Image (tube, helix red, strand yellow):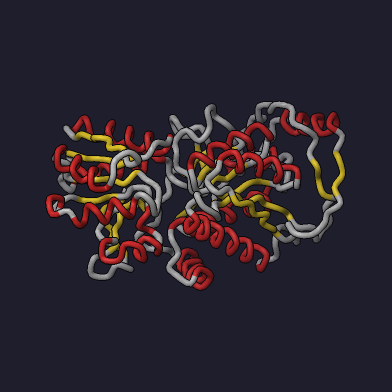
Amino acid sequence: MNGTHAFQDLDAGRLQDVVAAQRTNIRLLLGDGGGCNDGVITPPLPPVPPVPPVLFDTEPTAGTAIRIGALVPLTRPGWVEAGRHLLAGLELAVRDVNDAGGIGGRPLELVVRDTAADPRKAAAAVDELARLGVAALAGEYHSAVARAVAARADALGLPFLCSSAVLDALTEQPTEWVARLAPAQSRGWQIYADFLFGAGHARIAVAAEPSVYWASGTRILRDHLAPRGGTVVELDARSLTPAALCDELVDHGATALLLLTGHPDPAVPIVTSVRRDERLAEILIGAPAGQPEFAEWATLLGEDSPAIPFLRYLPEHLGPLGARVETALRGRLAEAPSFVAFEGYDTVTVLADLLRTHGTDRARIAESWPCVAVEGTRGQIRFSRTPDISVWQWVWAPVQVVDRDPAEPHRFRILHAG
């Protein structure tokens, strides 16, 4: 937030007393408003480790903005184009909330911080945003960064609604403080594996860079395909040149190559090399993480950009809200919005609903994830507990496998739906 603010220290002991008091009561529906509207008893949140005194702005008045901390990759090595779309969705939703009267007459305000795909930078931003008095955190695209944000938010007792990161293990232990809109990686990548197998591909090669996210994706593919006779071979995208990688694909007899790499490098050089190799004329190139979704992909690869299937989290047809938001996002971005932009819009939509219903108290917001029933751009959003997922999860956002149409590269073809 720009400008100078007068901040004051809240006595550390009084802060801990307040937080403890907020968490010791079990709230019932129709009691103090802390429970869900289905009459279910909401248990108190577990205690969080002691934290340093938090610096808050002066006491809120009727016109004081309610702040949401927005975490997005806006500079390299972050995926800048994804961050731009995510931020566009967040900002559009804030505008719509404020145009409709805000939250009880108070405007909603985003306090944006660039994470640049750096977990440590993101964790420091969480600390800063907590001191600035944000009611909740929103956003993030990269899974490794979202893990760092989730861990710090959990430690500080700060609600975090993750927009786009899909890694199943977003936190080491189950937490009440974190919820997620994007489908877990295990769901999306199993759907992608079903698509591959259904298209006749049982010998899969992955060109992978080292990361928790790519390793998790490889494991999901292997575990899902192995019972049906499928194999997955890993090729090191960092040590192999694109030409050497093509040789490996021929030697292994792979019928599909999946790009588990950063964009644009080394993904773009690999695609160019494979497309130019006559020995690999029949091989399918895939990018489950969604690199071809963004316009930069088509710009950099030109005629090599189509027919590379990827995961996209959109329904086949948008409803009235989704169609209206799509038009507004297109005007804001000056291009077709990606699914990431819709994730950003839905994130603020959910948080605004929680703030209207449950107020700005952080503990009460976190207790209310299971109360959410909000119409988003891609369907009704509800959160629940899901086996092997450590956070509150929307079960599920729509999942598609799509590619760019070779006849019209700016048009997407739906190849498979989950």
Task: Left or right? Give the position of 306 relative to 188.
Answer: left
Task: Relative to 253, say whether 347 is above or below.
Answer: below
Q: Residue at x 73, y 54 (%)?
A: 66
Task: Left or right? Give the position of 88 relative to 308.
Answer: right
Residue 258, position as x, y percentages in the image: 28, 45
Q: Residue at x 58, y 43 (%)?
A: 371
Q: Nearer the viewer, residue 210 or 347?
A: 210
Q: Nearer the viewer, residue 125 or 14?
A: 125
Residue 147, position as x, y percentages in the image: 53, 37
Task: Relative to 179, say whether 407 is above or below.
Answer: below
Asked whether the viewer can see residue 375, the reply is: no
Q: Residue at x 32, y 38 (%)?
A: 239
Task: Left or right? Give the position of 38 relative to 25.
Answer: left
Task: Relative to 305, say whether 164 is above or below.
Answer: above
Label count reads 0
Classify residue 167 by image quadrant: top left
Q: Quadrant of the N terminus?
A: bottom right
Asked whether the viewer can see residue 124, the reply is: yes
Residue 44, position as x, y percentages in the image: 67, 30
Q: Residue at x 74, y 27 (%)?
A: 50
Residue 33, position as x, y percentages in the image: 70, 43
